[in-house]
Image: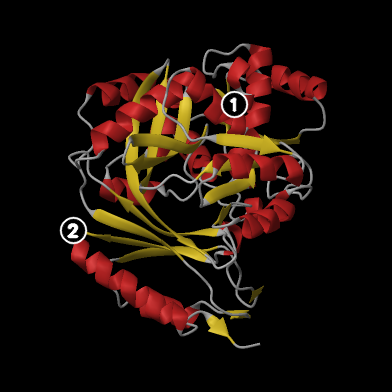
């Protein structure tokens, strides 16, 4: 029985935890903080863990894990990545990443800077703690739009695309000094070149520096009037897609340069006219994934592959040797976008979804009767609808129907 500690087993990490549990692993849960945002505890299952421990200091946590005889320490979500790295460095377990580059896997400035040192194509950038210096960089750079974001954050939290100096200054002060969704204070603001092109997600799982590609997904995002970014559609592509190979080969270089040798990686890559360039990468699983949906699309998926790399490494190595996935069905992950204030109610919306030929599942991040705000970032998107079908045109039509239902207030009662 393998003993696995999961740090912040939230988001898609809760599904990996369940698969590890079902494969006979003994699970321990470590919460990286006592005051983590309630968003992360949605759907968390305490029952599959033998122990639940809250981190206060490294010494006590190390002693706890020693007593438990831990063999693997992994991050279940973005908020757990840093602590998982620290604990792995202390125990010197085989299933770990390069601790020297732990900051570069979280800090988005260091991330891009590391790639440039390795000669890997990446965006122009600068980091700033005062507007005067930032303004000078913007004027010297001389190209709009530009992207402003925190050095460390999750999803599109605090990300703004700015078309001019005025909007850049507004975004700068919205970010600087504020706490983000990871409970980190934004002491600096990162300003980057806006990468023009088509954005993709490249998900992988590594074992001993060998990578298994689990999903390549075409992203569609929306830019709000405020400059904030929200998610629209995740559209998984087949390994025969003409852009697949160049995206995968680039991302493998990124993964190794940033010291991701074991476990999942979730990369956002812009395919520009000059080739792929990294938007950002995280040493954890893609948060929107669901294992049941992966079985109907790629047959495996990042969540199951991550669990396999720990519980069944022989099977994982066989999967690496096999050919890259072929899509069984097409899918869209449709991220809901709320357009007005109201009281959330699911029933009538679910009934409408059930009429769609490609509807598979809907996951809400709010509860019945909650007052919900207009969507302004990824954390205020009220849910995700998962569409699966062998005919891509059916999915496209159903997507349009969802947006029409949503715009008419399909899951709202008026306040």
Left or right of 227? Residue 241 is left
Q: Which residue is mark 2?
A: 390
Q: Which quadrant holds residue 228? A: bottom right
**What number is the disc on residue 104?**
1
Q: Residue at horizontal 29%, vertical 74%? A: 356
Q: How many marks?
A: 2
Residue 305 placement (x, y as % from top left): 38, 33
Left or right of 138? Residue 400 is left
Mark 2 to mark 1 CA distance (whole Å): 40 Å
- Residue closest to the eye, 121 or 318: 121
Residue 161 placement (x, y as % from top left): 54, 54
Left or right of 318? Residue 413 is right
Left or right of 177? Residue 105 is left
Q: Which quadrant holds residue 371? A: bottom right
Confirm whether residue 27 shows in the render. no
Residue 65 placement (x, y as % from top left): 70, 22
In the rendered view, would you say 124 is above or below 163?
above
State the SS at label 1.
helix
State the SS at label 2.
loop
């Amino acid at each position: 029985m393998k003993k696995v500690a999961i740090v912040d087993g939230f988001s898609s990490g809760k599904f990996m935890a369940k698969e590890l549990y079902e494969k006979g692993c003994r699970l321990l849960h470590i919460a990286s903080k006592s005051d983590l945002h309630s968003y992360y505890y949605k759907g968390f299952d305490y029952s599959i863990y033998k122990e639940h421990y809250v981190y206060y200091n490294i010494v006590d946590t190390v002693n706890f894990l020693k007593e438990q005889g831990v063999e693997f320490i992994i991050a279940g979500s973005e908020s757990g990545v840093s602590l998982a790295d620290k604990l792995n460095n202390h125990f010197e377990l085989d299933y770990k990443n390069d601790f020297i580059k732990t900051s570069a896997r979280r800090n988005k400035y260091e991330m891009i800077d590391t790639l440039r040192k390795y000669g890997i194509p990446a965006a122009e950038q600068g980091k700033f703690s005062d507007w005067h210096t930032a303004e000078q960089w913007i004027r010297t750079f001389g190209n709009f739009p530009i992207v402003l974001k925190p050095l460390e954050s999750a999803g599109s939290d605090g990300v703004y695309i700015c078309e001019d100096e005025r909007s850049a200054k507004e975004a700068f002060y919205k970010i600087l000094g504020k706490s983000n969704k990871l409970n980190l204070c934004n002491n600096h603001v990162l300003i980057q070149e806006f990468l023009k092109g088509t954005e993709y997600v490249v998900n992988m799982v590594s074992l001993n520096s060998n990578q298994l590609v689990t999903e390549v997904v075409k992203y569609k995002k929306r830019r709000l009037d405020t400059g904030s970014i929200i998610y629209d559609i995740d559209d998984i592509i087949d390994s025969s897609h003409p852009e697949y190979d160049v995206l995968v080969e680039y991302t493998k270089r990124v993964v190794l340069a940033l010291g991701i040798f074991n476990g999942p990686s979730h990369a956002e890559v812009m395919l520009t006219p000059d080739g792929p360039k990294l938007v950002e990468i995280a040493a954890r699983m893609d948060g929107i994934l669901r294992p049941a949906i992966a079985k109907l699309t790629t047959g495996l998926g990042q969540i199951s592959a991550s669990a396999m790399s720990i519980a069944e490494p022989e099977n994982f190595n066989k999967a690496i040797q096999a050919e890259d996935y072929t899509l069984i069905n097409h899918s869209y992950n449709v991220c809901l976008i709320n357009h007005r204030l109201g009281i959330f109610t699911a029933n009538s919306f679910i009934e409408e979804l059930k009429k769609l030929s490609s509807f598979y599942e809907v996951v809400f991040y709010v509860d019945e009767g909650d007052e919900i705000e207009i969507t302004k970032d990824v954390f205020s998107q009220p849910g995700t609808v998962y569409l699966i079908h062998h005919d891509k045109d059916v999915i496209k039509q159903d997507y349009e129907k969802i947006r029409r239902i949503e715009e008419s207030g399909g899951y709202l009662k008026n306040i």
